[in-house]
Amino acid sequence: MRVVIQRVKKASVSIQDSITSSIGAGLLVLVGIEESDTQEDALWLAQKITSMRIFSDEEGKMNLDILQSSGELLVVSQFTLHAQTKKGNRPSFIRAARPEKAIPIYSYFLEQLNVLLAKPVQTGTFGAMMDVALINDGPVTIWMDTAQKE
């Protein structure tokens, strides 16, 4: 699984010009699922995301996690995170999981985030054409891949 995590002042998802999900201060997480990904990967990422200390404390240091900062979470599926661009000019998405594989892992990932945050996680709609709007905070943007677990 690959994620791009962006600390935001606010973020929203619109489908056909209608806002379907929105958050205030917190994290926007774009998530891509690969054919080889498992529930174990989803759990690892959920734990990592919710415990990552990337919010400022009273001294302005990145010392707080999303729970400590009372932040919100918006998760958007994005298979294009698995684009292969080595050959040619048209990206290949062959490694991205097909919906029948990706949806159960995506759902499990959301369930784990809901449990760890103890509040509802906002989401986009899997497979839909979405407009994602955000105001970066910092900006703080972090990329992670469970294949590397860095």
Image (cartoon, grey):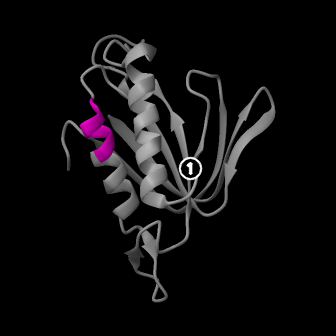
Camera-side residue: 80 or 86? Answer: 80
Picture residue at 44% right of the left edge, 54% below the top: 115
Q: How many marks?
A: 1
User: In the rendering, at what x and y percent does residue 78 appear?
Assistant: 48, 29
Q: Quadrant of the N terminus?
A: top left
User: In the rendering, at what x and y percent does residue 69 appear?
Assistant: 51, 73
User: In the rendering, at what x and y percent does residue 41 appear?
Assistant: 27, 38
Q: Quadrant of residue 23?
A: bottom right
Q: Is residue 102 left or right of residue 1?
A: right
Q: Main secondary structure of the magenta part?
A: helix
Q: Is residue 90 left or right of residue 43?
A: right
The question of residue 50 being in magenta is answered with no
Q: Can residue 91 be seen from the camera position used here?
A: no
Camera-side residue: 55 or 120? Answer: 120
Residue extending farthest right: 17
Camera-side residue: 105 or 85? Answer: 105
Picture residue at 47% right of the left edge, 59% below the top: 117
Q: Quadrant of residue 48?
A: bottom left
The stretch in magenta equals 38-43
Picture residue at 78% right of the left edge, 26% below the top: 16
Q: Residues within 10 Å of mark 1 (few under 14, many from 20)?
A: some
Q: Is residue 92 above or below residue 7?
A: above
User: In the rendering, at what x and y percent does residue 110 appear?
Assistant: 47, 42
Q: Which residue is mark 1?
A: 121
Secondary element under disc 1, as helix, strand or loop, is loop
Q: Can residue 117 be seen from the camera position used here?
A: yes
Q: Is residue 99 above or below residue 117?
A: above
Picture residue at 64% right of the left edge, 23% below the top: 129
Q: Amino acid at mark 1?
A: Val
Camera-side residue: 20 or 2? Answer: 20
